[in-house]
Amino acid sequence: MDLSVLHLVRSPERNYKWKDRLNSLTGHLSCRLLEWSGWYNQDMLQRLLGHYRLYQLFKIENNSACNHLSLPLAYIMSYRASQGFKYALSSITAALYYVVTFGKRYTPLQIEGINHLLVRDKATILQQFLQDSEKDFPLAISKAFEQIASTNFFNKAENRLTLIQQKNEYNHYQTSSHYFNDYTTTVQPDSTNVKGKEKGVFSKKQLLLFFDLIAESKAVDKIDYSKPNKFDGIATMLRAVSGKSKDSILEQLKDTRTNGLYSFRNEGELKQLIITLTNLSDIFRKAGFRVVANIADKKLRELERV
């Protein structure tokens, strides 16, 4: 597995040797120890990796005893049983940490809080991540992170894990009879859930970042966010480039005018911005646009200093 997807800042000055060594552990005891010690709660990417590791162990241990649930759903239901206790331990640790450090925050508790939502109200995201990670782990974790980083993630939603069909058939044959329990497991679509973007296609935010980086190379003019009367024409152009709806692009332009293209309100949004710029840098570099890739790297260094 390529663990570089967990590196929020790709820089020669950053040494991820020990982090990668711990993240590469796959044994039953090792993963359980990392889980209960809070290692997987260091950030959201770590948390998703933790679910992936524990899910792989769960499949080995429970492959033939999941009560007719799909394996991802069975894992989520099993994880829920101990998640409340883990959250309580993190809360106690956070209180002690606050006292000892004279008011500093305990980041793992924040991740544990998000994880609480992820395994309950937003379990559809986790289920999809576990399924997709079997095929393409880097893409699956990137998609799941984008959904969690979205403001819609924190909208109140009821748990939608349901079993919608149970069919019992009793078929008689000449020499024997067979009893079938056919359980079909599905997840109802969540109206607040953000669909992941198509693989290899820029999101609206990435499009704006793309043009901003190109503009800094002096190849094209920058988008002037101080002139909203130009937004309609810009949205029309971006729609032609990306195929995304004009209204959604206009909304992104207005949001960028208000909040800024490189702004962030919390650590989670900062990490997401770093991941987005890192991906753009890689795309430019692989395509041979090294000048633009270097500009993206410069932006990353500025964010790293923040």
Image (cartoon, grey):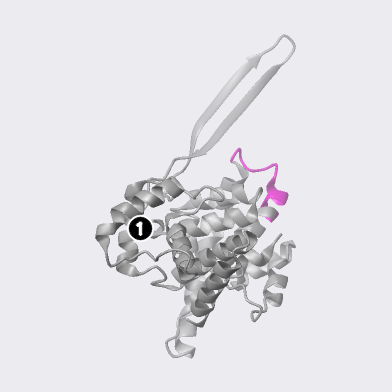
Q: Is residue 102 above or below residue 292?
A: below
Question: In the rendered structure, which segment of residues is drawn in magenta?
Answer: 57-69
**30 and 248: which is toward the camera:** 248
**233 and 300: which is toward the camera:** 233
- Quarter of the image for residue 138 reads bottom right
- Quarter of the image for residue 53 reads bottom right
How packed is label 1: few (under 14 Cα within 10 Å), some, or many (20 or more)? some
Residue appearing at x 72%, y 9% in the figure: 174
Residue appearing at x 44%, y 90% in the figure: 102
Q: Is residue 44 visible?
A: no
Amino acid beneath label 1: Gln
Residue 163 among those drawn in magenta: no
**300 and 143: which is toward the camera:** 300
Q: Is residue 284 visible?
A: yes
Residue appearing at x 66%, y 78% in the figure: 12
What residue is disc 1 on? 252
Name the residue furthest left. 229
Residue 61 among those drawn in magenta: yes
